[in-house]
Amino acid sequence: MSDGTFAKNENFRSWFMDKLLMGMSWSEYSRRLITPFNIVAAIILAIGIPVIATRFVYGLASVTHASNEYPWGLLLGWGLFGGVPLSATGFVMGTAYYIFGFKGYKPLVRLGVLTGFMGYLFAVIYLLTDLGRPWRIYYPMIIGFGTASVLFLVAWHVATYLTVQFLEFSEAILEWLKSRRVYRWATMIVIAMTIAGIILSTLHQSALGALFLLAPGKLHPLWYSSYIPHLFLSSSIYAALCMVIVVSYLVARFVRHATDRNFLENLDPLTVGLGKGACVGIFVYLALKLIGVAHDDNWHLLNTPYGKWFLVEIIGFVLMPALVLTYGVKIKSAGIVRLGAFYALIGIILNRMNVSIIAFNWNLPGHLHHIIPPWQEVVIVLTIATIHILIFRWIVSRMPVVREEPGYSGGH
């Protein structure tokens, strides 16, 4: 090996280790890994990974109660139907910044794109874990149901949107790698990717709701509505704004070393600004929910057991967080806005769990047994969620997501 080749390999090794260990030695980096959160995460992974292996070795029946009558359990109720609306952050923040010109939200744009990309990526992972034959994931896209199928639409849109969001986030990756030549190309396609993301995301958010249009006799009438695609889309918009509010606070609280002064100083006013948008979105969604009940004349069902549960969702987890958000915005309290945003996210997850699990095939025997998931399924969900958090934190800690990279301040 020549001296030049050796020097080049040594330089690459030094550069790689610097990126991997953030400029620390192995001993320093190892000591920093010993934290209460990492210890808990290691315990969860130690228990959960063998359970995931059990699912793939012995089949779905070993970890879930899902069946032909009850096709979706916690894996999809939480991971796909609950996760996708929370992952609309990329298209919402990209639209606000690049299309509508809200330039003041620049500190949160990449965080929104990363949150969306990671959310969709792990929604696919939940889906692959739940599929009986995950290696045939391409069937609805190429072989299976045809272009008129809603599953064809969802499969292609999610796959394409994942690619689009990766390209949107590539600016941050290339800044981190100091790849200026490719970086110039990445900045040139951001607007095009944002527009593509708007088209794809609005269509597949509503398409997830359209799946349930095919099951009018299976989904409880209070949750089933011809408006359900619009409900899924409208709820995803305010869910995205609330998700950015919550995630930005968690980053500032627990990954503060990865932020810069601009992010921290502007976080509170930007939080209140996002809260204003979330207020509008959540009241629009509430109005559409009531219009759906009125359109189908289902008021009499409100006095049934499921009707009372529907009121818990609407009043307790839509109207109440809307009022909390409104109050927080009115007095310009970022803390109260964050509380309202977190409350609203719980409501979104509850709605998706109601639609996909609790109110689905509600009149079949053994429904309660289906609603309560087995411990193995809970452990799998907890394990995948832990991996999601660890990878998200790894990226934010290293890449210029919530900070400006020196020499690239004119970027996104």
Image (spheres, rainbow, N blue to C red):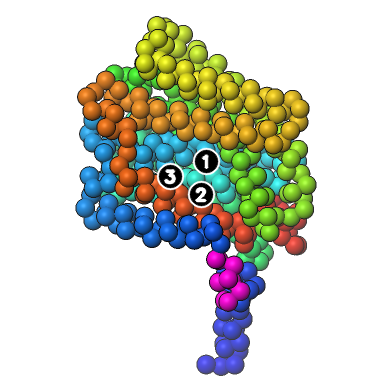
Q: CA distance from mark 3 to mark 1?
A: 9 Å
- Residue 179, how many percent across, how many down? 64, 65
For the record, the magenta segment spans 26-34
Q: Residue at x 46, y 8 (%)?
A: 294
Question: Could you say whether the residue bearing mark 2 is in a helix, strand or loop?
Answer: helix
- Residue 7, how many percent across, how many down? 61, 87
Sequence-wise, the earlier of marks 3 and 2 is 2
Amino acid type of the residue tagged 1 in the rendering: Ser
Q: Is residue 39 left or right of residue 101?
A: left
Q: CA distance from mark 3 to mark 2?
A: 8 Å
Q: Is residue 66 left or right of residue 392?
A: left
Q: Is residue 23 above or below residue 80?
A: below
Is the C-beta separation of discs 1 and 2 under 8 Å?
yes
Sequence-wise, the earlier of marks 3 and 1 is 1
Q: Is residue 287 magenta?
A: no
Question: Could you say whether the residue bearing mark 1 is in a helix, strand or loop?
Answer: loop
Q: Which residue is mark 3?
A: 123
Amino acid type of the residue tagged 2 in the rendering: Met
Amino acid type of the residue tagged 3 in the rendering: Ala
Sequence-wise, the earlier of marks 1 and 2 is 1
For disc 2, the neighbor class at 10 Å (few under 14, some 14 to 19, many from 20) is many
Q: Residue at x 61, y 77 (%)?
A: 25
Q: Which residue is mark 1?
A: 87
Is the C-beta separation of discs 3 and 1 under 8 Å?
yes
Q: Is residue 373 above or below residue 4?
A: above
Is the C-beta separation of discs 3 and 2 under 8 Å?
no
Choose between 143 and 239: the one closer to the eye: 239
Q: Which residue is mark 2?
A: 118
Q: Is residue 191 visible?
A: no
- Residue 372, how many percent across, how many down? 32, 35
